Image (cartoon, rainbow, N blue to C red):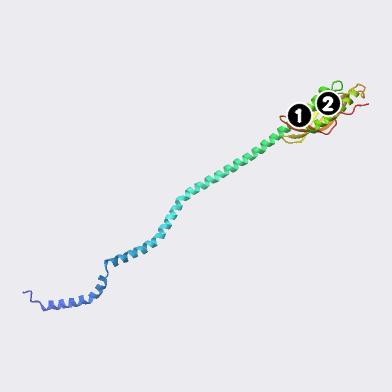
């Protein structure tokens, strides 16, 4: 069969197919009219929108992950700070009570020193002999300071004359002393001195006597000295 000779049925089929293609072509043209750039733009836009939606989630996830990573370290740091504060508070408390105890012990030690000094000074006051008063006055002045020293120096000549006229001899028999109050540099001591007195008034016979006084003690260097006294040195001799 010649190629130029076409089957009528085939022609009819070709015609029908052509009509169908023509009807479909406008719709296809709308699709095919889109250029590759337009397609890429649409795809990029879609990806951008999707990416922009995903980006906050990614940032939030990163922040949470960062915080989660820091939490253990922060907890450890907080615990260490708390322990450090407790240690500092404990050390401060210990130091405070240590200083309190040390100051208290220092005051007690100073009071004991003052008491011993007062007890040692009492026999110096009560032991004298009118026939030999120079050593007595020297010893009294050696343990005196302040107002008491001034007072004794001012009355020493008069006292010397009175004791000499009465031929007074005194000897300490017993000394009792206690601290009334005091700190590390000063104290008040209550002193009671038992003594035996012999004089013209006792007709040469020993007579018991007693001196009671409050000594104001003051620390001068490494010594405790008598700063003031509120009792007479010795009882008036009997006529």
The residue tagged 1 is: 117
In the figure, residue 117 lies in which quadrant? top right
Residue 123 shows in the view = no
Give the class, few, some or many, for how many residues have Cα within 10 Å of label 2's Cα (few <14, many ≥20). Answer: many
Left or right relative to 3: residue 89: right
Give the class, few, some or many, for how many residues have Cα within 10 Å of label 1's Cα (few <14, many ≥20). Answer: some
Which residue is pictured at 15% across the width and 76% down the height?
14
Residue 53 image offset from top left, x and y in percent: 39, 62
Does residue 239 lie above or below 89 as drawn? Answer: above
In front of the other: 99 or 121: 121
Name the residue furthest left: 1
Dot 2 lies on which element?
Answer: helix
The count of marks equals 2
Residue 193 image offset from top left, x and y in percent: 83, 28
The residue tagged 2 is: 126
Alpha carbon distance from label 1 to label 2: 15 Å
Position of the N terminus by quadrant: bottom left
Residue 141 shows in the view = yes
Which residue is pictured at 35% across the width and 63% down the height?
48
In front of the other: 202 or 35: 35
Position of the C terminus by quadrant: top right
Name the residue furthest right: 239
């Amino acid at each position: 069969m010649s190629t130029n000779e076409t089957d009528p049925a085939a022609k009819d089929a070709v015609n029908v197919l052509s009509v169908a293609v023509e009807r479909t072509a406008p719709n296809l043209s709308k699709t095919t009219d889109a250029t590759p750039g337009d397609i890429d733009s649409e795809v990029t836009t879609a990806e951008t929108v999707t990416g922009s939606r995903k980006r906050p989630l990614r940032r939030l996830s990163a922040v949470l992950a960062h915080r989660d990573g820091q939490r253990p370290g922060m907890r450890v740091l907080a615990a260490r700070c708390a322990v450090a504060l407790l240690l500092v508070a404990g050390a401060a408390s210990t130091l405070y009570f240590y200083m309190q105890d040390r100051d208290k012990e220092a005051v007690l030690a100073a009071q004991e020193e003052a008491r011993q000094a007062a007890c040692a000074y009492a026999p110096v006051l009560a032991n004298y002999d009118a026939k030999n008063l120079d050593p007595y006055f020297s010893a009294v002045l050696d343990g005196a300071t302040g107002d008491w020293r001034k007072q004794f120096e001012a009355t020493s000549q008069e006292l010397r004359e009175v004791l000499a006229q009465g031929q007074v001899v005194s000897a300490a028999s017993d000394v009792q002393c206690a601290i009334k109050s005091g700190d590390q540099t000063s104290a008040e001591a209550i002193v009671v001195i038992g003594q035996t007195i012999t004089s013209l008034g006792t007709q040469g016979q020993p007579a018991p006597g007693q001196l009671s006084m409050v000594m104001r003690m003051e620390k001068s260097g490494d010594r405790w000295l008598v700063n003031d006294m509120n009792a007479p040195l010795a009882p008036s001799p009997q006529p």
